[in-house]
């Protein structure tokens, strides 16, 4: 295997194998809910803490994602 191929393989594996919890949540949502959450995360007037609080209050707390995970995902420091 050439190096290029090796790096490409590694990148593909990471992309699909190491999503943060926010990435996993986005994948699990309906298209409408996913778009809503993406819009909210792109809106700087929503703090990550408030987004976290709203998610926790939804659906009996099944979306339990901490503000630090949300802010990391928003600033693209996660591996999604
Ligand atoms: Zn992420």
Image: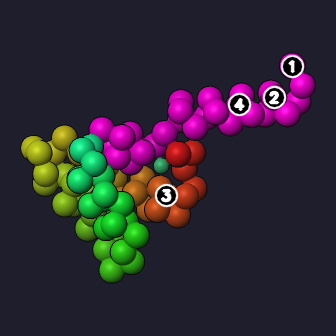
- Residue 4 lies left or right of residue 24; in this view the side is right
Answer above or below: position of 62 versus 67: above
Ligand 1 neighbours mark 3 (CB distance < 8 Å): yes
| Tag 1 near tag 2, CB within 8 Å | yes
| Tag 1 near tag 4, CB within 8 Å | no
Taking the view exactly as shown, the residue that stands out farthest to the left is 60
Q: Of the residues under marks 1 and 4, which one precedes in the sequence?
A: 1
Residue mark closest to the camera, 4 vs 2? 2
What's the colour scheme?
Answer: rainbow
Taking the view exactly as shown, the residue that stands out farthest to the front is 31
Q: Quadrant of the N terminus?
A: top right
Reading the image, the residue beneath label 4 is 10
Q: Of the residues under marks 3 and 1, which one precedes in the sequence?
A: 1
- Residue 75 lies left or right of residue 30; in this view the side is right
Q: Kindly report the distance in space between the C-alpha atoms of the residues bearing marks 2 and 3.
A: 29 Å
Depth check, front residue: 58 or 39: 39
Give yes or no for residue 23 being in the magenta stretch.
yes
Reading the image, the residue beneath label 1 is 1
Q: Kindly report the distance in space between the C-alpha atoms of the residues bearing marks 4 and 3.
A: 22 Å
Reading the image, the residue beneath label 3 is 72
Answer yes or no: is residue 34 visible: yes
Q: Kindly report the distance in space between the C-alpha atoms of the residues bearing marks 4 and 2.
A: 8 Å
Residue stretch in magenta = 1-28
């Amino acid at each position: 295997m050439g190096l290029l191929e090796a790096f490409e393989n590694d990148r593909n594996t990471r992309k699909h194998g190491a999503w943060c919890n926010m990435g996993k949540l986005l994948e699990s949502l309906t298209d409408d809910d996913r778009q809503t959450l993406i819009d909210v995360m792109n809106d700087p007037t929503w703090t990550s803490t408030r987004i976290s609080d709203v998610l926790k209050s939804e659906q009996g707390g099944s979306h339990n994602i901490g503000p630090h995970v949300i802010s990391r995902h928003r600033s693209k420091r996660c591996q999604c």
